[in-house]
Amino acid sequence: MTVPASDRLLRFTRRAYHAVRSILRQMSWSLRRGLAPAERRYSYQQPAIRHRFRPGESVLDIGSGGDPFPHATVLADRYLEPSRHRAAEFVSEHKPVVICDISAMPFREKTFDYVVCSHVLEHVDQPMAACRELQRVGRAGFIETPVLMKDALFSWAKGMHAWHVVGIGDRLVFFQYDTRTAEGVRSTLWHDMIFSPVYHPLQRVFNDNQDLFNVLFEWSGSFRVTVFRAGGDSESDA
């Protein structure tokens, strides 16, 4: 069946219109400044934190690095100098600083009203021990880790992260990376686009959905932990 010339022209016109529209849209992006990811994690953490901080409360930020929690009264970190796990310079904001390991913190039981632990647990060798220490020294707290999707898209895990984490109710579930999963998508395309000085609409998608790219886990009193190792072994505290 022969398609009328008028229909062929209409189809061609529609395709040309959408092609030109796409080109013009991409040209307009190149004229806009890129949307940098949030410099302070608290900007997206705040909606997930139900705790109301009161004057006089003691708040520990363990692994504070270059972005200390704004309500912290004490900062703690394993290293003050940049390392392969942290490129940013350490920032103290003139607050007390304690050098320690998260798995053996030099504080008495329930020293702190609130303990913040952001982007630390994905690095540790023994997540069960680290989580027990958080609960030992604090009455409540907040934990943030990247999810598997984020690590995979940025190809960040290899040589950096030992675990990807899921929060389910009052439980954190740790999954040890195997070699292939740690490699992620094996491309810098996502990283280059998100951190580009030139605008791309996916930059806004990333910035506006940090609750999907990170586990944002608040706990009070205690929380439960399950650990799955790459070899098939597992452990759970309850």
Image: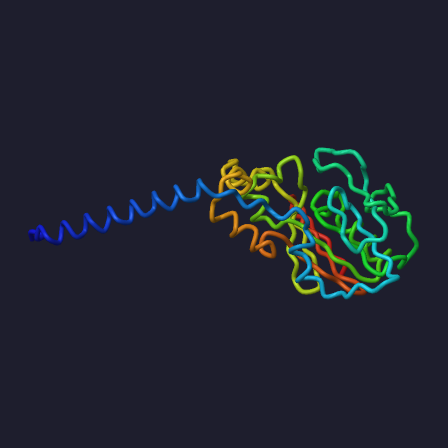
Residue found 88% across the figure and 61% down from its top: 56
Its colouring scheme is rainbow
Res 65 → quadrant: top right
Q: Is residue 107 left or right of residue 175?
A: right
Marks counted in the figure total 0
Res 85 → quadrant: top right
Question: x and y percent of residue 168 in the render?
Answer: 65, 62
Residue found 64% across the figure and 55% down from its top: 166
Residue found 6% across the figure and 51% down from its top: 2
Question: In terms of depth relative to the viewer, which is nearer, 118 or 155?
Answer: 118
Single out the residue that lies furthest toward the front.
Answer: 31
Question: x and y percent of residue 200 in the render?
Answer: 47, 45
Q: Is residue 221 left or right of residue 149?
A: right
In this rendering, is residue 136 above or below 159?
Answer: below
Residue found 83% across the figure and 43% down from its top: 101
Single out the residue that lies furthest toward the right.
Answer: 108
Q: Is residue 83 left or right of residue 231?
A: right
In this rendering, is residue 50 above or below 166?
Answer: below
Quadrant for the C terminus, please.
bottom right
